[in-house]
Amino acid sequence: MPKKVLIVDDAQFMRLRTAKLLRENGYEVVEAENGEVAVNQFEAHGPDVVLMDITMPIMDGLAAVKAIRGKHPHARIVMCSALGQQAVVLEAIKAGARDFLVKPFDPDKILAALQKQVS
């Protein structure tokens, strides 16, 4: 059974690029353009792993991690950040994120991070 991944990023091209990579590698993909939509998508689809951007409008990734982990303490969330956001990444880890990736993404690193979470 394919593992389901929720991709959360306000940049549509990042969601499309990441979704294409994941689908080509056997993952089922759900998308969200901000943290608020991500919380709703998590409830609706129960993904195995979430790839969560930090900086987004409406609800940022940090608030979304806290909201998801508040209801689902075992949720597997991997934060995605641009260089220079190390302090925010540390805060995300404290909030319950299990790992983080630095943008721009290396496809092999995305796949390795997901494999680590689903195995």
Image (cartoon, rainbow, N blue to C red):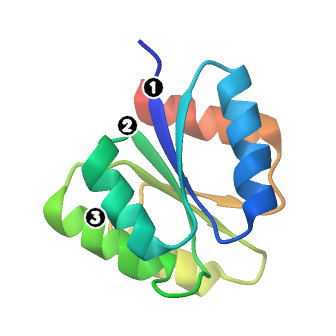
Q: On the rendered image, what quadrant is the C terminus found in?
A: top left
Quadrant position of residue 70: bottom left
Is residue 34 rendered to the left or right of residue 48?
A: right
Q: Is residue 41 visible?
A: yes
Q: Is residue 46 above or below residue 1?
A: below
Tell me where residue 91 appears, x and y as whole percent: 44, 81
Label 2: how many Cα within 10 Å (few below 14, some 14–19, many 20+): some
Label 1: how many Cα within 10 Å (few below 14, some 14–19, many 20+): some
Confirm or deny contact between disc 2 and disc 1 (CB under 8 A).
yes
Q: CA distance from mark 2 to mark 1?
A: 6 Å
In the rendered picture of this protein, how many numbered marks are placed on residues? 3
**Could you tell me which secondary element the residue under label 2 belongs to?**
loop
Q: Is residue 2 above or below residue 35?
A: above
Confirm or deny contact between disc 1 and disc 3 (CB under 8 A).
no
Tell me where residue 82 appears, x and y as whole percent: 75, 74
Q: CA distance from mark 1 to mark 3?
A: 19 Å
Q: Earlier in the sequence, mark 3 or mark 2?
A: 2
Which residue corresponds to the image point at 73% horizontal and 41% vertical from the top-left? 109
Is residue 83 rendered to the left or right of residue 59?
A: right
Label 1 sits on residue:
3
Label 2 sits on residue:
48
Q: CA distance from mark 3 to mark 2?
A: 13 Å
100 or 20: nearer the viewer: 20
Confirm or deny contact between disc 3 and disc 2 (CB under 8 A).
no
Which residue corresponds to the image point at 75% horizontal and 48% vertical from the top-left? 16
Q: Is residue 94 visible?
A: no
